[in-house]
Image (cartoon, rainbow, N blue to C red):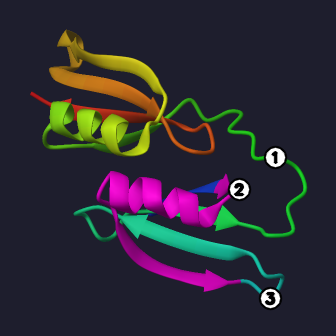
Amino acid sequence: MEIQHTAVAVEDLERTKAFYEDGLGLAYAWDFHTDEGVHNYYVTGDKLDTWLQFVYDPEREDPVQPDGIVHLALLVDDLEEIFTGMVDRTGCTVVREPVTIEAADARAAFIEDPDGYEIELFEML
């Protein structure tokens, strides 16, 4: 058994695509629309069999609430470069500056995406 994808609701698909694709460098994988008009849009990293799915419903009346999701973790090669680049390019909210996590032999930083989801940028040492 493998985890294939995680789906999150988004309020503005174009803004979300810009953040994850242009900002973080994730790549478009595929997309489809349901009969109800909901747009399901998938991005991926280097491992092409794992996706992050954005669910955009143009008829949604309630604001997106990222309740229950603590964070989404993205494994990166150069934490400082990705973190600094994201803050400079997108002006995203910094939740936590880069820190070393000795117990995990890693470094991590936390930022917020346009819908308020917390993103952990994680680099193995």
Residue 26 falls within the magenta-colored stretch: yes
Identify which amino acid the numbered label 1 is placed on: Pro
Q: Residue at x 26, y 41 (%)?
A: 85
Rendered image: mark on residue 99: none
Q: Nearer the viewer, residue 17 or 54?
A: 17
Q: Residue at x 23, y 40 (%)?
A: 82
Q: Is residue 13 left or right of residue 62?
A: left
Give the extent of the magenta segment. Answer: 9-33
Residue labelled with disc 2: 11
Identify which amino acid the numbered label 2 is placed on: Glu
Mark nearest the camera among 3 and 1 is 1
Residue labelled with disc 1: 63
Q: Residue at x 55, y 58 (%)?
A: 15
Q: Is residue 79 left or right of residue 112?
A: left
Q: Quadrant of residue 90?
A: top left
Q: Quadrant of residue 117?
A: top right
Say above or below: 87 vs 19: above
Say above or below: 90 vs 87: below
* Quarter in which the N terminus is drawn: bottom left
Q: How many marks?
A: 3
Residue 124 falls within the magenta-colored stretch: no
Identify which amino acid the numbered label 3 is placed on: Asp
Residue labelled with disc 3: 35
* Residue 1 appears in the picture as rendered: no
Q: Position of residue 67 (x, y in %)?
A: 71, 34
